[in-house]
Image (cartoon, rainbow, N blue to C red):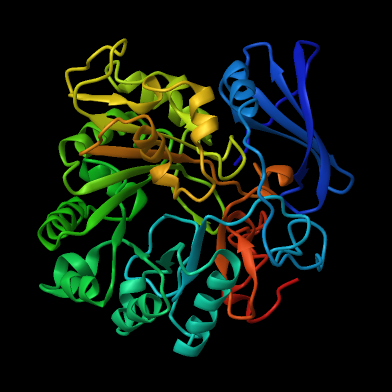
């Protein structure tokens, strides 16, 4: 799903990197350059499958600005020797340059939806990990980042497992303070008392897929209109006293015109909505939806700024520091009177990035801050009291067409498997041009 481009004489070299051939997944030298319109492209040539140029970012100046804001790297603990060329030898291997900050446990491949837009390619639940295997994956996380880290339970659809409360309880008993469930919300909406049962077991957050505010968006991303389900889940979270993060798969031509409305919806519901995670849709796994163009985080940042009614500009969204600056960016919206020099906005919110300098951000940054807390922690150091707000994160996942393997080696989001490995998210979900996975579920068997 790339744009083919014939490179002419009007281009400006930006830097060199390494990329993949989407057909054979060979790692290849790549040139990154800006065309005459300032659009960023990544080009490589496979000796077997030819040249490919991928559109990477809408604005070269913004791309280079973000790249200049890279934070020092904290190496992972317990890295193992690579078992193959990148990205086929992950584990986390000794080539990796940053430690994990978000760890996932995939508890099922079963799902009660068959969404056209889904990197999971969810299927039947056959071969789901046992409780002993899930315990082993918790131990992988404890060994990699410590039990004081946060865990996201994902799938498939985790609520398809009847023992989900026991899985959550196991994590809390092992000392994990934050356990979040990544869900489509169908079961939570349908079953009275179910969310309360999960909270009683130790659930601390719901990561809810929430792609838009009109039914036609869900018909495109989920195959049917389930907006009423999503709204009911948010109300249930409010009643149960558990925070929810809304996760949006942004698809060009489908819901990219609703980013401003989604932001305003989250600000209006900031009493229960703690975060908005904007994720440009990528083509690993199953991607059956039509879209006008592939999108990058840069496209999302510019569109969000354009639709925010003056609340933010593109350079109010800063790197989160935990991974490559092109992969994870964000901003925190503070509710209240802005500090002197920061213009008030009719929404009553202002971006935290206007209340600090980049130098203050760098000085106050802690690699131990969870992604959504980076700005809050620094504001606290400055004496700014924050009683209400919203974290917005833009995550730039990569597929075989867009994967920059140098960026991959800075991934801080890992999927754990029972054999003790922690695999970078974009590697774990990677599929080639024919849809074949590099890493099968839980890596119980090898396809390569």
Most distant residue in the right direction: 47
Horizontal side, residue 182 vs residue 439: left or right? left
Question: Where, by quadrant of the figure, is residue 270 drawn?
Answer: top left
Horizontal side, residue 427 vs residue 123: left or right? right
User: Is residue 357 or residue 420 the one in the foreground?
Assistant: 357
Q: Is residue 412 visible?
A: yes
Rendered residue at 10%/59% (across/down): 239
Question: Where, by quadrant of the figure, is residue 436 drawn?
Answer: bottom right
Question: Where, by quadrant of the figure, is residue 124 drawn?
Answer: bottom left
Q: Is residue 128 visible?
A: no
* Residue 304: image location, x then y, percent: 37, 27
Rendered residue at 68%/27% (across/down): 41
* Residue 416: image location, x then y, percent: 56, 70
User: Is residue 382 or residue 79 the one in the foreground?
Assistant: 382
Q: Could you tell me which quadrant the C terminus lies in?
A: bottom right
* Residue 269: image location, x then y, percent: 16, 41
* Residue 312: image location, x then y, percent: 35, 20
Seen in the picture, residue 25 relative to 140 is either above or below; the reply is: above
Seen in the picture, residue 210 relative to 321 is either above or below; the reply is: below
Seen in the picture, residue 389 relative to 114 is either above or below; the reply is: above
């Amino acid at each position: 799903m790339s744009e083919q481009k014939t490179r002419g004489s009007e281009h400006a070299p930006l830097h060199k990197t390494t990329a993949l051939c989407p057909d054979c997944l060979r790692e290849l030298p790549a040139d990154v350059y800006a065309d005459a319109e300032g659009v960023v492209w990544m080009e490589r040539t496979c000796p077997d499958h030819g040249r490919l140029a991928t559109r990477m970012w809408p604005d070269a100046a913004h791309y280079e600005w973000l790249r200049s804001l890279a934070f020092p790297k904290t190496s992972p603990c317990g890295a193992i020797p690579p078992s193959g060329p990148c990205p086929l030898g992950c584990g986390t291997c000794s080539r990796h340059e940053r430690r994990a900050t978000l760890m996932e446990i995939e508890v099922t491949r079963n799902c009660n939806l068959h969404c056209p837009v889904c990197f999971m390619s969810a299927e039947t639940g056959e071969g789901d990990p046992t409780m002993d295997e899930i315990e082993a994956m918790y131990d992988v996380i404890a060994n990699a980042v410590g039990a004081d880290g946060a865990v996201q339970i994902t799938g498939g659809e985790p609520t398809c497992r009847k023992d989900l409360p026991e899985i959550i309880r196991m994590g809390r008993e092992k000392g994990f303070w934050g356990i979040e469930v990544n869900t489509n919300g169908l079961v939570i909406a349908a079953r009275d008392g179910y969310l309360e049962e999960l909270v009683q077991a130790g659930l601390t957050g719901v990561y809810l897929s929430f792609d838009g505010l009109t039914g036609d968006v869900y018909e495109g991303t989920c195959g049917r209109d389930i907006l009423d389900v999503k709204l009911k889940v948010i109300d249930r979270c409010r009643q149960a006293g558990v925070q929810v993060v809304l996760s949006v798969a942004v698809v060009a031509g489908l819901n990219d015109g609703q980013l401003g409305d989604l932001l305003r919806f989250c600000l209006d519901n900031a009493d229960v909505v703690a975060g908005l995670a904007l994720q440009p849709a990528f083509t690993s796994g199953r991607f059956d939806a039509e879209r006008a163009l592939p999108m990058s985080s840069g496209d999302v940042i510019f569109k969000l700024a354009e639709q925010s009614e003056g609340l933010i500009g593109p350079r109010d969204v800063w790197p989160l520091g935990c991974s490559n600056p092109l992969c994870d960016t964000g901003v925190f919206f503070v509710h209240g009177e802005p500090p002197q020099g920061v213009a008030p906005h009719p929404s009553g919110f202002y971006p935290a990035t206007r209340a600090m300098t980049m130098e203050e951000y760098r000085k106050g940054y802690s690699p131990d801050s969870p992604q959504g807390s980076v700005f809050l922690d620094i504001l606290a150091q400055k004496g700014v009291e924050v009683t209400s707000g919203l974290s917005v994160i833009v995550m730039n996942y990569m597929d075989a067409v867009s994967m920059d393997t140098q960026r991959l080696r800075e991934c801080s989001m890992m999927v754990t498997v029972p054999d003790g490995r922690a695999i970078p998210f974009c590697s774990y979900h990677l599929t080639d041009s024919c849809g074949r996975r590099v890493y099968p579920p839980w890596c119980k068997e090898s396809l390569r």
